[in-house]
Amino acid sequence: MAPKKPRVTRNPELIRGIGTYSRSQMYHKRGIWAIKAKHGGVLPRHDPKPKPQAPAQKPPKFYPADDVKTPLVNKHKPKPTKLRASITPGTVLILLAGRFKGKRVVFLKQLPSGLLLVTGPFKINGVPLRRVNQSYVIGTSTKVDISGVNVDKFDDKYFAKEAKKKTTKGEGEFFEAEKEEKNVLPQEKKDDQKTVDTALLKAIESVPDLKSYLGARFSLKAGMKPHELVF
Amino acid sequence: MVKGRQGERVRLYVRGSILGYKRSKSNQYPNTSLIQIEGVNSKEEVAYYCGKRMAYIYKAKVKKNGSHYRCIWGKVTRPHGNTGVVRAKFKSNLPPRSMGARVRVFMYPSNI
């Protein structure tokens, strides 16, 4: 049937479950008497429309012993993690763990998976374009002007590992096959790094001491208490 | 963990010492340990450290995964008392010989 506008009832509710008008009053209000008069004393009947023949299904070979419950449909789509207020594009972050722990790094954007896209820049401290989790990072109050950088092309698929090709191993070739491919970084990724970094380096060099600040590593020293530090 | 490269030594953890297990006068409960974190002296200061991960690192004779060093991971759960001592739960209970030993309290998962 064509979608109808939801009909407002002619019977205003006094209390939930009880209407203002009785059955006979509603019969009169709805005009059933007029419809019957038009059709010679009988309420018109519509025969059900013939349904299109459903394709014949074979009876299944196997019936489970107990009734199997079908799980409820889940249409929930996860959102990327909420970004802390201290982390905005262009903030200098301190990495707390991993290969680059202690390095100060520039935050570019948050990827759809929730991870943060970050770059050294590579020339300054050796940190390439990299993803990092928000929990393993301290946001400082230092900001870098990031307006000259275009980060639209980076997303999680850019950082996906390449699928390993399965090679059949022959007995004799067993030891040779191990040496095959070293992971060479494709030239395309090196060029991406360069384009992002050149725009950033201009912004960094315009601020005094920022370059050496980003090159230096953060470390806790004697007497430093993290719960009292202001970053 | 010791790495074979000439890295700069950065310390991104706070030192702590293991005081013992959670206990009453004559009963102890080894599933929770008490840790004294350096520089933390009151219950309010502990709020920063709640939830932070910590590691108890020790040496063993047999090499596992290519190293003589082994580690038990845990986290700070809550303050203990008024003067900055902290309760911690580890993946497996700390061994009794760890009492008085060093523990590393990391700054992650971070919230600043």
Image (cartoon, coloured by chain):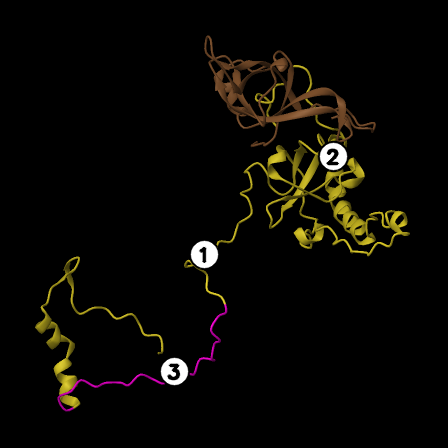
Chain colours: A yellow, B brown
CA separation, marks 3 and 1?
A: 29 Å
Image quarter of the C terminus of chain B: top right
Q: In the rendered structure, the residue with mark 3 lies on which chain?
A: A
Q: Is residue A17 above or below residue A98?
A: below
Q: Is residue A231 above or below residue A204?
A: above
> Can the viewer see residue A155 in this picture?
no
Query: Few, some or many C-alpha atoms within 10 Å of disc 1 (few <14, some 14-19, many ≥20)?
Result: few
From the image, tell me which residue sits under label 1: A71
Q: In the rendered structure, the residue with mark 1 lies on which chain?
A: A
Residue bounds of the magenta highlight: A40-61
SS category of the residue bearing label 3: loop
CA separation, marks 2 and 1?
A: 43 Å
Return the x and y of residue A57 as percentages of the image width and height: 47, 76
SS category of the residue bearing label 1: loop
Which mark, by number, is residue A99?
2
Residue type at mark 3?
Lys
CA separation, marks 2 and 3?
A: 66 Å
From the image, tell me which residue sits under label 3: A51
Q: In the rendered structure, the residue with mark 2 lies on which chain?
A: A
Query: Few, some or many C-alpha atoms within 10 Å of disc 2 (few <14, some 14-19, many ≥20)?
Result: few
Q: Are marks 2 and 3 in contact (CB under 8 Å)?
A: no
